[in-house]
Amino acid sequence: MPLKIHNREARRLWLASQGLDKPPTGALDVLAIIKRLGFVQLDTIQAVVRAHHHIIWSRNQNYREPMLDKLMADKRGIFEHYTHDASVLPMAFYPMWRRQFRRKKEAIDRSHYYSTMLNAKGRDAIKTRLANEGPLSTHAFDTKAAKKGMWVRPPHKLALDYMWYAGELATSHRVNFTKFYDLADRVFPQALRAQNHSDATQINWLCHAALDRMGLGTLGEIQKFWEAMDTQEVKTWAQDAALVAVELQAADGTWSEAFAPVDIEDRLSRLTAPTSRLRILSPFDPAVRDRNRLSRLFGFDYRIEIFVPAAKRKWGYYVFPLLEGDRFVGRIEAKADRAKGVLNVFNLWAEPQVMWTGARAAKLDAELSRLAKLAGVSEVNWHCPKLIT
C-alpha cells in the first residue's frame, strides 16, 4: 500500500526541504543555501530588492547583496545558466549540467528568433575580442537591430546569448546587474570540464536531485524543477529508479499519487513544527514558484501580475506572499524608495479565515523593518490600513 502523507505533513516537509522551517538566523553560508535549493532564480525587477537576493535572505537574514556577486566573480562558487529561467547554480553541478547546454543550443538552432544573430565568423570575432580583452558586456559591441521592438535584440546580443546558452561563453561577473561575458574555459574549472558523464547519468542525477529537494512530487513536478529534461526522459528514469510511491493529501482534502525518496519515512519522523516567524517571500522564491503545487499543498492561489494591465490586476504589480508557520496568511504590496530611504507599503490582504490580530501585525512590522534593512532604507511608511481585526 502506498504511504499516506497528510496535508500538514506535506506542507512541513516542503518547507523543511526549502529551508523555511527554521528561523533565518545563525552562521551564514551562501553557497550551502544555494546547494540546498538547487538553484536561485535571477530577476531584474527591484521593487524592494532583486529576487535572488531576497530568496537567499529569506533563509538567513545576515545575507547582504554583495555576497552573491563575490561568490560568483571572486570565488567561482556558482555559475549562471538557464533552468526554467536565468538562475545561479553551484559550480560543482557543472558536470551534470552539460546536457542543458546542448539542449538549449539545439532549441535555439530550431528557433527563428535567433535568425538575425551574427554568423559563425562574427561569433568567432567576439570570442577573439574576449580572449584578447577579457570579459565584456553587450555594451562593448555596436551592431544594430534591423527593427525596433520590446523583444528585438541586435545581432551581437543574440550571438552572445547563443554562445552563453550553448556553454561556449559564461558569465564572468555582473556590474549593477549588467552581465559580463567571458570564454567558458576561463570561468568553469578545468577539473569540472574534464568530467564527461553519459546522458543517462546526468538525467539520473538531475531527477534524484530534484526529488531530494522537493521531499515528494509527481513526475511532472520533477521535470519542472530544473527544466533540464523532457517528460519522456523523466518517465523512462522513473521505471528503474528507487522511489517510494505515496498518496498525498491536498489542502482541499483530496488525495493524489506522488513519489518520494527512499528515506521518506525517516524525513517525516524528523519533522517538527516550523518557526512561527512571519516571512515576506519573494514572488520568485522556489517555495512558491510552482503555483499549481503551491495551491495543492497550501490552498494558496497566487499569481504575479507584472505583465497584467493595471486595470485588470486583482492584487497589484509586485505583491509578496506572507508565510507564517506552515500556512500562507496573506500578501502585501510594497516598494522601496532608496533615494528617500523609505519602504512604502501600499496594500495588505489577509487570506480568508485568517484573523489579522495585533500579534500578527507586530510580526509583520518586525519583518518589514528587517526587509527595509536589506534594501538599505531606514523607514517603513504605510499608505493603507494595517488590517487589525
Image (cartoon, rainbow, N blue to C red):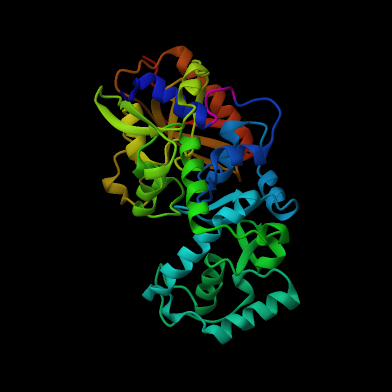
At x 32%, y 25%, the residue is 2
At x 36%, y 42%, the residue is 219
- Foreground residue, 16 or 59? 16
Instruction: Identify whether 127 is placed above or below 350.
Output: below
**How many callouts does the rendering have?**
0
Location of residue 44 in the rendering, given as x and y in whole percent from the top left corner: 52, 53
Residue 379: quadrant of the picture: top right
Q: Residue furthest front?
A: 240
Residue 143: quadrant of the picture: bottom right
Quadrant of the snapshot with the N terminus: top left
Q: Image check: 358 left or right of 132?
A: left
Magenta stretch: residue 276 in it? no
- Foreground residue, 4 or 40? 4
Can residue 255 be seen at all in this image of the molecule?
yes
Q: Image check: 73 left or right of 360?
A: right
Q: Image check: 79 left or right of 10?
A: right
Residue 251: quadrant of the picture: top left
Can residue 316 be seen at all in this image of the molecule?
no
Location of residue 294 in the rendering, given as x and y in whole percent from the top left corner: 36, 34
Location of residue 4 in the rendering, given as x and y in whole percent from the top left corner: 33, 21
The segment highlighted magenta reads 19-23
At x 39%, y 72%, the residue is 149
Quadrant of the snapshot with the C terminus: top left
Q: Residue furthest bottom?
A: 121
Instruction: Identify whether 291 is placed above or below 156.
Output: above
Q: Image check: 170 left or right of 349?
A: right
Location of residue 181 in the rendering, given as x and y in whole percent from the top left corner: 64, 67
- Foreground residue, 105 or 277? 105
Majority secondary structure in the magenta region:
loop
